[in-house]
Amino acid sequence: MATYQYRCADCGPFDVIRPIGRALTEEPCGSCAGPSRRVFTAPLLARTPTPLARALHAQEAGAQEPRVVTDVPPARRRPTPPSDPRQAGLPKP
Ligand SMILES: [Zn+2]
């Protein structure tokens, strides 16, 4: 679906959502039902957020050339338990 903009001579601009490529040259105004001509505007091009772009790039690169691992990744440290004195007497896992 795409948003197309039209302009009514009396009421001003309004948007119509239609499937891509199905925009009509005229649409009835939503307020007065008068014929309104389509207004051509710049497409809504949103820049991809940087973290998403990095993730997409890494995913795409990994699909073509998987990274070669040469050593074992470092062990994860266990999270430190809370220092609640009431838990000092409990058995350790
Ligand atoms: Zn109108």
Image: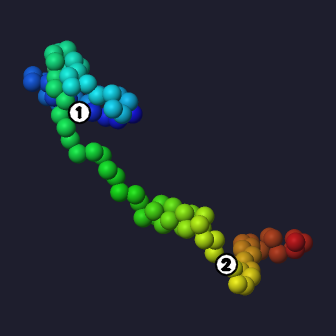
Q: Looking at the image, can residue 70 be seen?
A: yes
Percent of width and height locating residue 49: 41, 60
Question: Which residue ends up furthest to the top in the rendered image?
Answer: 33
77 relative position to 17: left or right: right
Relative to 92, does residue 5 appear above or below in the rendering? above
Judge whether 77 appears above or below 36 on screen: below
Element at label 1: strand
Q: Residues within 10 Å of mark 1 (few under 14, many from 20)?
A: some
Identify the residue shown where x is 48% and y is 60%.
52
Which quarter of the rendering shows the C terminus?
bottom right
Specify the label residue 22 is tagged with: none
**Residue type highlighted by circle 2:** Val
Residue at image point 81% right, 71% down: 87
Residue 50 horizontal/vertical position (percent)? 42, 64
Q: Nearer the viewer, residue 18 or 63?
A: 63
Q: Which residue is mark 2?
A: 68
Residue 25 appears left or right of 53? left
Seen at 40% across and 57% down, the residue is: 48
Answer left or right for 41 relative to 63.
Answer: left
Judged from this view, the residue extending furthest toward the right is 91
Give percent across and percent down for residue 76: 72, 77
User: Could you tell me residue 64's position as x and y percent?
Assistant: 59, 66
Is the shortest distance between ligand 1 and the CB of mark 1 under 8 Å?
no
The residue indicated by pointer 1 is: 5
